[in-house]
Every structure is written in structure tokens, then in C-alpha cells.
Image (cartoon, rainbow, N blue to C red):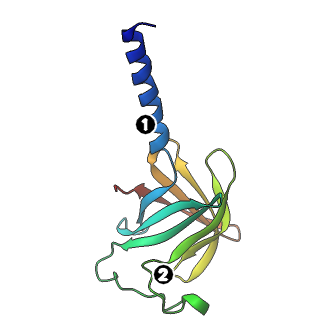
Amino acid sequence: MGIRNKWIVGVICMLLYIPSEAQSVFGKWKTIDDRTGNPKAIINIYEKDGMMHGKVVKILEPGKEEAVCDKCEGEKKNQPILGMKIIEGLESGGSGVWKGKTLFDPEQAMTFRCKIWLNPDNPNELKVRGYLAFIYRTQTWIRAEG
């Protein structure tokens, strides 16, 4: 193989690698309030023991940086929202979809069943759907830089 062909193959390999890295559900995501359109927090979504987890790493709402979960019960009662785990133990359902029983909303002090997946039209958008019985609500979170 000539040097030119090796260069072309190398460029193609790099182009194929970059999108697959950018299309991971793992990393930092900016939550957007679907009612107001305002950013609320940065959530770090990570994988541990083959399961998806996520915790609040930054509060973006002015004046709520030191907020505690005053509506919570049990061990989360009056705990800081910053650092709180809000996604626990989601399993891969295949095709890039993660499902589970623990998506916690500290503002409402409620836990929802959930489904999380990348927007197939925009890998910088994460679809986060919470279920309460047969009712569901879907938010779009935006990939956060760094």
C-alpha cells in the first residue's frame, strides 16, 4: 500500500473514531427545565459495574447553588442537592437505550422509572423520560463541555 493510501486510510479511521466517542451517553449533561427552558444543573452520567449512574456536579440556577432536599424523606432529607446521586442502576436495553427504576427529582422529592437515550438526530442531546404509572414526561438535556 502506498504512502498516500495509508494516509487516506488513517484519516478515515480517525473520522470513524471521533463520532463514536462523541456519541456516548456518558459524560456531563446540562439539564434544561422543560417548562421554563432555563438550565438547572450539570449531571455527570457514568458507568459503574455495567450500569448507568448520574449525580449532580453543578447547580446552574442562581440562588440555588447551596440548595438542600428539604422535601426529601429518609437519608436524603436536608442533604445538599450538589453531589446527590439522581440516576442509579439503569441497565442497557440495547440500541443505546438505558432503562431503570431510579431517576430521582430532588425538587419534587420523587423517584421515577426512566428511559434514557441519545437523540438519533443530534448526539449532543440526551432524551430523559421519567414514568409515573402510565404518565411520562421527557426532557432534553444538552451535552456540557468539559
Residue nearer the viewer, 126 or 28: 28
Residue at image position (70%, 67%) is 134
| Image-based side of 83 in relation to 111, left or right | left
Residue 73 in view in this figure? no
- Residue 142 in the image: state x and y as whole percent: 41, 56
Residue 70 in view in this figure? yes
Question: In the current view of this chain or complex, which residue is farthest to the top?
Answer: 2
| Image-based side of 3 in relation to 88, left or right | left
> 74 above or below 82?
below
Badge 2 marks a residue whose secondary structure is loop
The residue labelled by disc 2 is 107
> 141 above or below 73?
above
Residue at image position (45%, 81%) is 81
Badge 1 marks a residue whose secondary structure is helix
Q: Mark 1 is on which residue type?
A: Ile
Residue at image position (62%, 65%) is 136
The numbered disc on residue 18 is: 1
Disc number lying in front (1 or 2): 1
Residue nearer the viewer, 36 or 4: 4
Q: Which image quadrant is residue 141 in?
A: bottom left
